[in-house]
Image (cartoon, rainbow, N blue to C red):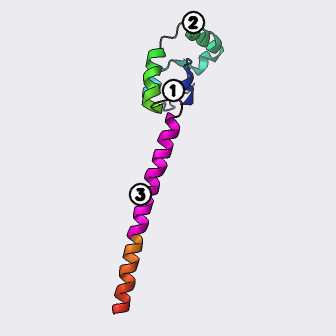
Amino acid sequence: MDWLALDRPLVITEPADSRVWQGQSPLREAVPGLPADDARRFSAKVGALMADDGARVARERLLGYYLGEVAPGAATKRFVAACHDVIGRRSGETRAIDTVAASSAADEKGA
């Protein structure tokens, strides 16, 4: 999905075998397809998209959908926040395990 941040057209090639499942997604719906049988037209298709990029607005929406905020540093802030969240959860789990272990050890001494 990194290409979305580059603000460039994209063409998705479609399999020659119609039995191949392609799935549905916001990306698949917004990006024009090129049947494998028309691969020789790829350059012309991309050239036409470069001249008249009718999917640009749709790609801008997809940028937010898939990548969120893309301003410089935004991804790093999200990553660091996610790390802090995981560390906090893990610390809580460790404290809970230590509490259970201490309680079990006290029960064993008393028995």
Q: CA distance from mark 1 to mark 3?
A: 46 Å
Magenta stretch: includes residue 81? yes
Q: Residue at x 43, y 51 (%)?
A: 85
SS state under label 1: loop
Given contact means CB atoms under 8 Å apart, are the residues at marks 1 and 3 in contact?
A: no
Q: 41 left or right of 59?
A: right
Given contact means CB atoms under 8 Å apart, are the residues at marks 2 and 3 in contact?
A: no
Disc 1 or 3, which lies upstream in sequence? Answer: 1
Where the C terminus falls, by quadrant?
A: bottom left
Observer-nearest of 4 and 20: 4
**What are the residue bounds of the magenta stretch?**
70-96
Say which amino acid is labelled 1. Answer: Ser
- Which disc number belongs to residue 51? 2
Observer-nearest of 78 and 55: 78
Q: Residue at x 44, y 16 (%)?
A: 57
Say which amino acid is labelled 2. Answer: Ala
SS state under label 2: helix
Q: Which residue is mark 1?
A: 18
Q: 47 left or right of 73?
A: right
Say which amino acid is labelled 3. Answer: Arg
Q: Residue at x 37, y 82 (%)?
A: 104
Q: Position of residue 7 (x, y in %)?
A: 54, 19
